Image (tube, coloured by chain):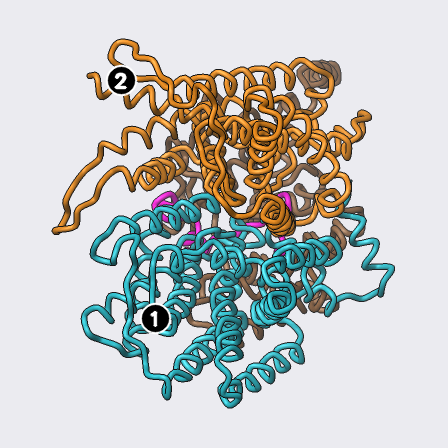
Amino acid sequence: MKAGAAVGRRAGITGKRWVFISTLAIMGLLLFVPSFHNDYINLTFRNILMYAAMSYGWNLIGGYTGYVSFGNVAFFGIGAYCSAVLSKTGIDNVFADVGLALVMCALFAIVVGLPILRLRGHYFGIATLGVALGLTDLANNLDFVGGSGGLNLKQADQAHFYLYYYAMWAVTLVCMLATFFIARSKLGYAFVAIRENEEAAQVLGISPTRYKVIAWALGGMMGGAAGAVFAPANGFVDPGTAFAVDNNVFPIAMAILGGMGTASGPFIGALLLSGVNEILQEKFLWLHSLFFGAIIVLIVVFLPRGLMYLVGLRGGVRRWLSDLRAFRV
Amino acid sequence: MQLFLQNLVNGILSGGILALVALGFSLVYGIMNIINLAHGAYIMLGAYLAWQLFTSFHVDPMLSVPLAFVVLFAFGYVVQRTVINRVVRAPVLATFLLTFALSLVFVTIALFIWTGDTRGVQTSYAGANFTLAGVTVPWAKLLTLVVALVITGLLYLWLHRSKTGRAIRATSMDVGAAQMVGVRVAHVYGITYGLGAGLAGAAGALLTLSYPLTPTMGDPFLIKGFVVCVLGGLGSVEGALVGGLVYGIISSFATQFDVTILGQHLSGTGLQDVVALIVLLLVLIVRPRGLVGRATA
Amino acid sequence: MTEARDVCLRVENVGMRFGGLRALDDVSFEVERGTILGLIGPNGSGKTTMMNVVSGVYKPTSGRAVFEGKRIADFPTHEVCHLGIARTFQVVKPFASLTVRENVAVGAMYGRFGAKRSGKDAFARTDELLESVGLARVAGRPASDLTIPDRKRLEVAKALALDPELLLLDEVMAGLNHTEVDEALHLLRAVNERGVTLIVVEHLMKAIMSISKRVVVLAEGKKIADGLPLEVTSSPAVIEAYLGSRFAKRQQQERERQT
């Protein structure tokens, strides 16, 4: 699989231990964000955590299993709508929201995954994109979920608003730890074996269908949980926010930047990319996308394998340049 | 019967432009293995070029089509040689991200020059149409279809007859072998990417006849182009044409779809893309390489 | 047949067509438990296709392959190894980004006894195997860094990690030099002595003759000989298939002149 090549020269399923420990330490620090009592800072970091959780979700199917999905936003949207519908029926409880989102996303992943995970490579990618677009149109046309007008959710009062931050933090932490432990378990080896060579994996006793659906469903549940917390925190859900293009592309970009198929990559990618985006937005207002785009261009051109490549690099600048040259024609 | 014919004609008319959009996308995808997310931005740039010429010098958008093609071709060639070529052999996700970022840059620049206001081109024949056997055909859409078909035909001939065209097809089959027989791959890739951008630009200029302009106008076309190109079969000219027409016809007929399930009223006009996407999924499951797909993965 | 033969694999009238191409045509043979069967034939004779049928990758278009009373085609590919059949690939297929140790461990995790093994047990089993096939020294290296002989060893180790009763080896000696071939033969004998039945597909006549107890020869999808190695090499049909009809005729004439 092409996607697997991005893992580069790093051998073995597990990354460097110190990288993950540092990631956990930063995660620990983020627990103190609400103590700034600053709405802007809260929102910014909640978004970072949200993107990280979505990126972890994508990383399981795209990074570990090698099935590059362009439609994982579908799960985020389902999660967000689960909360909105619960709120409509009078239930406003984050635990209930996340619980329902997990169940719905798992079911959706299994029903949709069984046919489309038979497709390989680009064809799988386009099918997932189709699924996400189809759901967007469906949400636009279902009165039950408010159609294109969307639904309002009852929010916690100002004094308890930081609870949403903690909920998102907890979701992200669970995604991170789940990824870490899955990667070291038998399950993780099944995913990577499928990514590296599906036929060989099959002969070694791995059922590709079963493990691809598992990866897709677990990843979907991660994205769904993020959506379920986002909806009440945002107070409003419509097809445009639930299935936003940014919510589809950013998590992929973050996983690539941080390192696909690693337990730290999505979080580091989310932190950096969102961080840069926020700073630029602050400084340049609407022109920030220009600089944001330019920075991503530079990163891809100079670090096409993501940051984790640097961690595993032996041979210094010379090796780096010669690796880069291999990508030209 | 009348309704059936009208839907069929509407589908074919909108399918032509989709085919043109998908064609450029498919070339770049099939030959260079790049999912070119900047394709929508090139459509937008072509459209604004035509709009600018129309507003400033009263040039008919039809006349701007070849110009948009040439300008965007040159632009695409330069972008490929200076930026994309540096990572063209990196995993497909690297170029995916790169072209996304490029598109962000182009759209922001367009926003700076032309602002986010919705623009439009008012030609003398904008609303004109004629009726044949009870079927209404707008002149602008018919003209668009004809131009799209002509461009597709010319491209097909060029790819199969000209020396450069053959070099491009050879490169798509085996880069190493093409290099060995003296094909300058970097140049070929530049031309391919330039063609992709040029076709997008031409499509954009054509679109000004029937669609409003905004800096993000390319996004829905990018996605439909992506779908059409896979529906038809990657990297194939015929595939893009067949896929575009099929997509256009399906979504046209889907507008007739009107049901109420469990008290939920679903009207076809909003769901035409859902129907088209469901067809895409079915096609992929039955024919994983697209309608006229060949054995390139 | 007077003595009761202990057959573990029975290939019965297997035919395999791809479109108009007939890759296998009514091939039957039996494999006794604990033996080493050589499967030879010129290029394109259907050896690898036969391997794919026995390992469940292909479902035969006619006939059947039965292992321990079970029809192989009734099982999905990933369950065939749970029956006790393992195979190597002619074109080696390592998991490139994983280490050698991890590559083998995947087999130990999902193979015949995989369900009963924890991750830790799988790695313990892996370390024993790596020692026995001589890969312990490169256990921590990425599989993509290995030399050709080591890649072949890895392929065998991955298959052994499935704890097979029947092991199919598809050209594991191709591309090796003399000493490497000797090492490989030594390894295969050792595996066989531990009770694993082997089917060895090979292009190299010499290597296969020295190790096989029985040899089956395929040519253009048909079985043309089946017997002891010496019997098979003197069969005119085999000589013709391998060396062309003119050579076979000349040899025939020579033999007649001598008598």
Letter of the chain in orange: B
Q: Give me the residue at 47% from left, 27% from top.
A: B122
Chain name for mark 1: A
> What residue range appears in magenta?
C71-95
**The N terminus of chain C is located in which quarter?**
top left
Q: Give me the residue at 71% from left, 29% from top.
A: B191
Report whether A226 appears left or right of C149: left
Mark 2 = which residue? B5
Residue A27 vs B131, above or below: the answer is: below
Q: Is mark 1 on a helix, strand or loop?
A: loop
Chain name for mark 2: B
Letter of the chain in cyan: A
Residue B125: where, in percent of width, then height?
Answer: 43, 19
Residue C25: where, in percent of width, then height?
Answer: 46, 26
Report whether B24 appears left or right of B177: left
> Is B80 within the magenta?
no
Mark 1 = which residue? A235
| Residue extending furthest toward the right | A318
| Residue extending furthest toward the top | B133
Q: Which of marks 2 and 1 is in front?
A: 1
Q: Tag on residue B19?
A: none
- The answer to which image quadrant residue B1 occupies is top left
Report whether C115 appears left or right of B31: left
**The C terminus of chain C is located in which quarter?**
top right
- Three-letter residue code for mark 1: Gly
Residue B276: where, in percent of width, then height?
Answer: 35, 36
Residue B138: where, in percent of width, then height?
Answer: 37, 19
